[in-house]
Image (cartoon, rainbow, N blue to C red):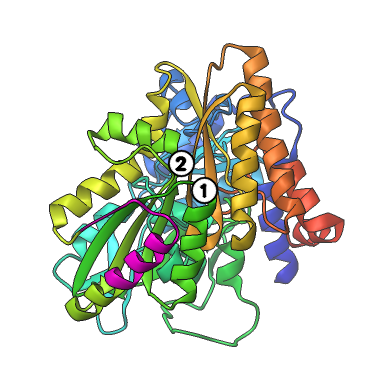
Amino acid sequence: MAGQLRGAARMLGSWRSYSLKGQQEKVSADFVEALKAVVGKSNVSTAKVVLEQHGHDESMHRCFPPDAVVWPQNVEQVSQLAALCYDHRIPIIPFGTGTGLEGGVSAIKGGICFNLTHMDRILDLSVDDFSVTVEPGVTRKALNSYLRDTGLWFPVDPGADASLCGMAATGASGTNAVRYGTMLENVVNLEVVLADGQILHTSGQGRRFRKSAAGYNLTGLFVGSEGTLGLITTATLRLHGIPEATAAAVCAFPSIQAAVDSTVQIMQSGVPVARIEFLDDVMMDACNRYSGLTNAVAPSLFLEFHGSRQALQEQLQRAEEIVRQNGSSHFTCSKEPEERSRLWEARHNAWYAALALRPGCMGYSTDVCVPISRLPEIMVQAKKDLEAFGLTGTLVGHVGDGNFHCLLVFNSEDADEYHRVKTFGEQLARTALAMHGTCTGEHGIGLGKRQLLKEEIGPVGIEAMRLWK
């Protein structure tokens, strides 16, 4: 059985390690008809515009379209389609909402794209057990809308309204991770179709326990596997209680160092901050313009606090004391839902605000994560390097867990600028590795970071991954 599982996973993932040179031959018309026999004619497309739509995500990597797109309606169809591709040695590419930032959906060797958005049911909600099971077409916002009257919510928030199963596949994180953890801590069980069509339940079928010491942590293995080990067809997620009260605050600082020092001190003081986000002066200016805000154009922190009304007041008071000690000249807080939503909507729109700095240009986001003590050093160096490389970029990040992004805006038609962007990204990642950090905190490896992954985990780690596949 173990050998079969390894072989099945190998067929799904191996296409990603091939050279980008030379596409394999297109799938035959007979094979396309076989796909239609499983899901119906209306759920298979070979139209050029559809293929191109599914050949890229929101990254700077160029489009590599699949040979066909299929829309399965249930896990049985996914299993049949996977077995069909396996028998004919045809690559499989899972596709959710296409909001990834590392080119993970690009069909670099052709193959069949499995668009899983038609599988969009919310299953097995257990309010008492704080868990719910969702299919891959369910997005983060759709789930929280469904949960609105239960007193529960799902807090992992990468910004984009991504598919929850896609978030599991990429090990997504986001603004609430400092308090509620990443997808890794919030996925209880997964139903996965392996490349040969076998169906695996990583924690056992229907199980939703809070902890277990039974064998390998298969759930953890598939979280962050980026579609290379199987197609996630359901995810059982851990839910959390909606806090009694919520407050948001924004504060400006004279320097990056002062902002990060405040972050560390707030966390060391035991203040249970739910979100703590950093935006540099360029990013604040872009957000002000894009979202109609009037915040100070300076290195800033966005904070959010959850708890009882009494505890909230104490948290705000303690946080304000800390930021004032670090030179903050502005500390504005709000408990009103409309104002809080406006503030965080501006933060979530940071990507589009950055793109608006150079209309018509593309964006690229770095994703390094370092020990919090090294954040000021690497961010200051990143600012210097942006200037040295002559690039337009902003800094924004989840500083509560050491993860930050440089949002670079560049002309993709300018070969020299494109090269400088790639060089900057690789240099920043290697700086993070030298500081005992990682080349990706939440976006994944995708197409562009395979060499960096080798440098990060070493040859033994790479070989261990290959053996599993």
Relative depth, front residue between 339 and 179: 339
Number of callouts: 2
- Percent of width and height locating residue 86: 63, 47
For label 1, the crowd category at 10 Å Cα-Cα, with few meaning under 14, some 14 to 19 and many 20 or more, is: many
**Badge number at residue 280:** 2
**Badge number at residue 256:** 1
Picture quadrant where residue 143 is located: bottom left
As drawn, 320 above or below 94 = below
As drawn, 420 above or below 132 = above
User: Comparing marks 2 and 1, which lies closer to the viewer?
Assistant: 1
Residue type (three-letter) at the residue carrying disc 2: Asp
Would residue 114 be found to the left or right of residue 117 on screen?
right
Is residue 175 something one can see in this rendering? no
Residue type (three-letter) at the residue carrying disc 1: Ile
Would residue 108 be found to the left or right of residue 94 on screen?
right
At 62% from the left and 39% from the top, the residue drawn is 382
Quarter of the rendering occupied by the C terminus: bottom right
Q: Could you say whether the residue bearing mark 1 is in a helix, strand or loop?
A: helix
**Badge number at residue 341:** none
The answer to whether marks 2 and 1 mark residues whose Cβ atoms lie closer than 8 Å is: yes
Is residue 9 something one can see in this rendering? yes
Residues in magenta? 316-333
At 52% from the left and 30% from the top, the residue drawn is 393
Q: Earlier in the sequence, mark 2 or mark 1?
A: 1
As drawn, 376 above or below 289 = below
* Magenta region includes residue 325: yes
